[in-house]
Amino acid sequence: MGRPGHPARFGPSVRLTGITYDSGALIAAGRGERRMWARHRALLLRRVVPVVPAPVVAQCWRGTPRQAQLARLLAGCEVEALDDARARATGVLAGRARTSDIVDACVVEGALRRDHLVISSDVGDLNAIAAAVNRRIDIDHP
């Protein structure tokens, strides 16, 4: 979880390093959860563009009219492609963490590389992946 004074709290003197959305954030936005939308609007007002790894989009996107809210959220995000270099780095991280969940490994790889706060409902799994390479990531719930 975010620590006091961390960007998740959005205090006036807090400097954001960046935000990465995991599938929990996208699901919350798709459901119209107010807390997630308030956070997203606050980020955009601060000119902070959330990053969503492409595999997270693939995990959540079904292309139905019921996903209008999700489409709206994604319009304000940077969807980071999973190119060859990122795919290999993600695979190495997944191997070290002994996980087959490539989406979670991709989220952690990007967040560690960018020093981002992650918005996710999957705190335990993401922390375990980061710990496998002796790193720590900050995670806050959507």
Image (cartoon, grey):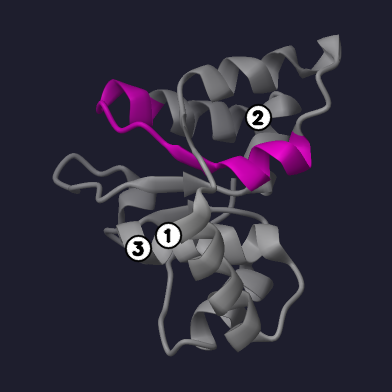
Viewer-closest of 53 and 83: 83
Question: Where does residue 37 sit, x and y in percent of width and height?
Answer: 55, 26
Which residue extends farthest left? 13
Place of residue 32 in the rendered image (x, y in percent of width and height, measured from the top left): 70, 23
- List the residue tagged with mark 1: 111
Q: Quadrant of residue 49?
A: top left
> Is residue 27 visible to the viewer in this orientation of the structure?
yes
Residue tagged 3: 113
SS at circle 2: helix
* Residue interval drawn in magenta: 42-60
Q: Which is more toward the observer, 45 or 72?
A: 72
The crowd level at tag 2 (other Cα within 10 Å; few <14, some 14-19, many 20+) is many
Q: Nearer the viewer, residue 108 or 15?
A: 108
- Mark 3 touching mark 1, by CB under 8 A? yes
Q: Is residue 52 a member of the stretch shown in magenta?
A: yes
Residue 29 is tagged as 2
- Hey, what amino acid is under mark 1? Ala
